Image (tube, rainbow, N blue to C red):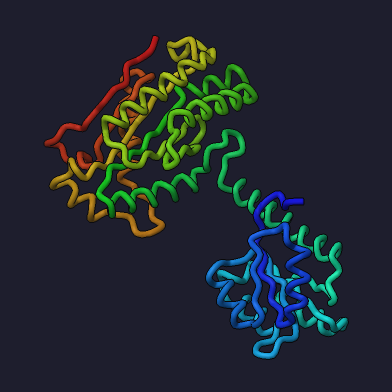
Amino acid sequence: MQAPETFSILLVDDDCTVVRVLSHILRDFGPLRFATSGRLALKLARDSVPDLLLLDVDMPDMSGFEVCKQFKRDPTLSPVPIIFITSHESPQLEELGMQLGAADFLSKPPHAPLVLARVRIYQRLKLLSETLRSAVKMDFLTGAVTRRQLEKALTQEWLRSQRAATPLTLLLLDIDGFTAYNGEFGEEKGDACLHAVADALRAVGHRPSDVLGRYAGGKFALVLPKTEVLGAGTVAQRAIDAVDALQLFHAAATGKSHITLSIGGACRDPSHSSVADASAKSREPLDGAIPDDLIEAAEQALNRAKLAGGHQAAILEIADLGHSGRQHAQIPAKPQS
């Protein structure tokens, strides 16, 4: 029976018979690699980090304990669980292995059901770990990425935009009167509203490189790589139309009978930059820093859209920030009735 998901295993034993037996037992897992020495094992592991290491204790050139020490000293390899394989049943030996960081022990000759049971435990642990890591990056309510992950994605795309001289747009998408909506209908309906809006926005930012994030409260953000001002305006209008189409009844306080969206966008387009680009370049973020200019411009644009009555979009070019002699590029989306 085929294993349900890929799980890479590295077998290390100088006894080719043991390697053949284990390879047969674990044939449904993959990819499956083997090494007959500790040094080769380290080379293979560094070339491609395995999900699990099955490691013989007694080897001539480098013992399994020495290989284990090398793994635990390497930040890339240290998380890999290690199961020692040995023909010596000794509590002292197991204690030493555990002190070095081993996860488990198996006896020789390998007993197929026991080997499979142990390996499946670590396969399930890997899946659980990946699920937890994914959950940390996601907003549970909406399925969008968290604010922290959004900022990481924005910084990466900003730096990529700088290197490749390609445009980059950030859209801030705010549900008009969401606080009033929560107050009128309660948190349960408010949560359902956020979930529905997030689904609609995901369909708008549908490219693999587009990133939808939960920004704050009833506010989302879309990171749109390789998107200039006109393209940003098109995406913004689609977002407004998509939320309109939900026809989520709203209080009359907003002046609309249903949930609407206001959008502020900021675009960095190297092809439109001149003197302002030199100023912006001096404020390029270091690795891990957040591109504040892009966020500031998007916030300013969102304020403009709100002050103009909401239910529309305004887009600013980042090169225009702080230059009073130049007009901000503004593209209001057509309000829907």
Q: Position of residue 130 (x, y in %)?
A: 63, 52
Q: Is residue 145 left or right of residue 337?
A: right
Q: In the drawing, does residue 20 fall left or right of residue 73?
A: right
**In the image, what residue occupies the spot 56% across and 23% down?**
193
Which residue is found at the position 73% from the left and 54% from the top? 124
Residue 301 higher or lower than 120, as above or below: above
Residue at 80%, 73% in the rendered image: 105
Instruction: Inspect this view and state whether residue 306 appears.
Output: no
The location of residue 84, given as percent across then percent down, is 76, 76
Front residue of 201 and 176: 201
Quadrant for the C terminus in the image: top left
Closest to the observer, 275 or 70: 70
Q: Residue at x 84, y 77 (%)?
A: 108
Q: Is residue 245 left or right of residue 309?
A: right
Q: Is residue 268 above or below residue 55?
A: above
Q: Is residue 247 above or below residue 231?
A: above
Residue 320 percent coordinates (x, y): 20, 39
- In the image, residue 9 sits, relative to residue 207, either above or below, namely below
Estimate the x, y position of residue 161 in percent, counting from the top left: 30, 49
Viewed as shown, does residue 118 lie left or right of 296? right
Is residue 132 visible in the rendered image? The answer is yes
